[in-house]
Amino acid sequence: MGLLDGKTALITGASKGIGKAIAITYAKEGANVAFTYLSSVEKGQALEGELAAFGVQAKGYRSDASDFEAAGELVNNVIADFGGLHILINNAGITKDNLLMRMTEEMWDQVVNVNLKSCFNTVKASTRNFMKQRGGSIINITSVVGLRGNAGQANYSASKAGIVGFTKSVALELGSRGIRSNAVAPGFIETEMTEVLDEKTVQGWRDAIPLKRGGTPEDVAQACVFLGSDHSTYITGQVLQVDGGMLT
């Protein structure tokens, strides 16, 4: 028996990294998984087969969650294809790092649109379905950077801080209908993106973390399993830090 048996989850931005780990962990726990990808078409198609191997229903959708109309269409398609939706995970995100002095308006707008507006789009599109079934779990992936800021990431940290405020507001609005809304804030997670960094720099980051290691995408995925499962039915409006004690 998996913790998510019989549930259908929609995960945005799942072709690699944390999103992919969430999708695989969810499938292992018995969830049917709908997921989106945008640029990584081959990876998205390959993941569909990987998930189906766990004996669950799985389908990838090439969709841009930051596009309001596309997000509405996506949610409708998922509900039609899977017969329902129980868990929504907003994971799609990008970075366009630069010092504020050199940050362009486009760099700001792109990051806020993909990271923050996409959460509004998908949650709004899913709300009617969640209200009708009087239940649902919304999980928005934020970041410790959204809680403490980071030089060179004013756009990213603003978008991730916005997710925290949005998540808490949704929890207050929809709680009476049995709909839960929580955020997960990863710290330093080692993915394909960090592999290209200088090893000495990365080791320095690890040494500064109380648990003395970087996190894995699976560490984040397990937190999402908990928040999507019936083990967390009295938890809403929270930010769960998965950061090895980095921010305490």
Image: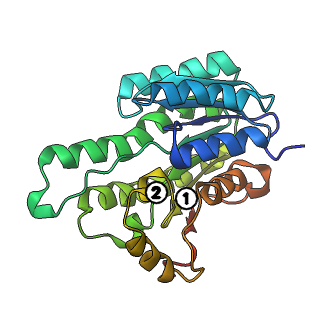
**Distance (Cα) linking label 2 and label 1:** 6 Å
The percent position of residue 166, horizontal first and vertical second, equals: 43, 52
Numbered tag placed on residue 231 in the rendering: none
**Residue placed under numbered mark 1 in the picture:** 184
Q: Label 1 amino acid?
A: Val
Task: Relative to 38, say whether 4 is above or below.
Answer: below
Residue 173 seen in the current view? no
Look at the image and tell me whether residue 28 can be seen: yes
Provide residue 64's location: percent of width, then percent of height.
Answer: 40, 29
> Which residue in the structure is indicated by mark 2?
142
In the image, 215: left or right of 134? left
Q: Earlier in the sequence, mark 2 or mark 1?
A: 2
Would residue 134 appear left or right of 116 to someone viewing this image? right
- In the image, residue 176 sits, relative to residue 53, either above or below, namely below
Vertical arrangement, residue 152 with respect to residue 77, above or below: below
Image location of residue 133, percent across then percent down? 70, 32
Task: Tell me the crowding category of disc 1: few under 14, some 14 to 19, or many 20 or more residues within 10 angstroms, Cα based.
Answer: many
The disc labelled 2 sits on which kind of residue? Thr
- Residue at 51% across, 37% down: 12
Query: Which secondary structure, mark 1?
Result: strand
Please count the marks in the image.
2
Query: With 188 as the anchor, is 155 left or right in this view?
Result: left
Image x and y of residue 6, in percent: 81, 33
Quarter of the figure that contains the N terminus: top right
Q: Nearer the viewer, residue 23 or 201?
A: 201
Quarter of the figure with residue 88: top right
Report the residue that reaches farthest toward the left.
Answer: 101
Within-10-Å neighbours for mark 2: few <14, some 14–19, many 20+: many
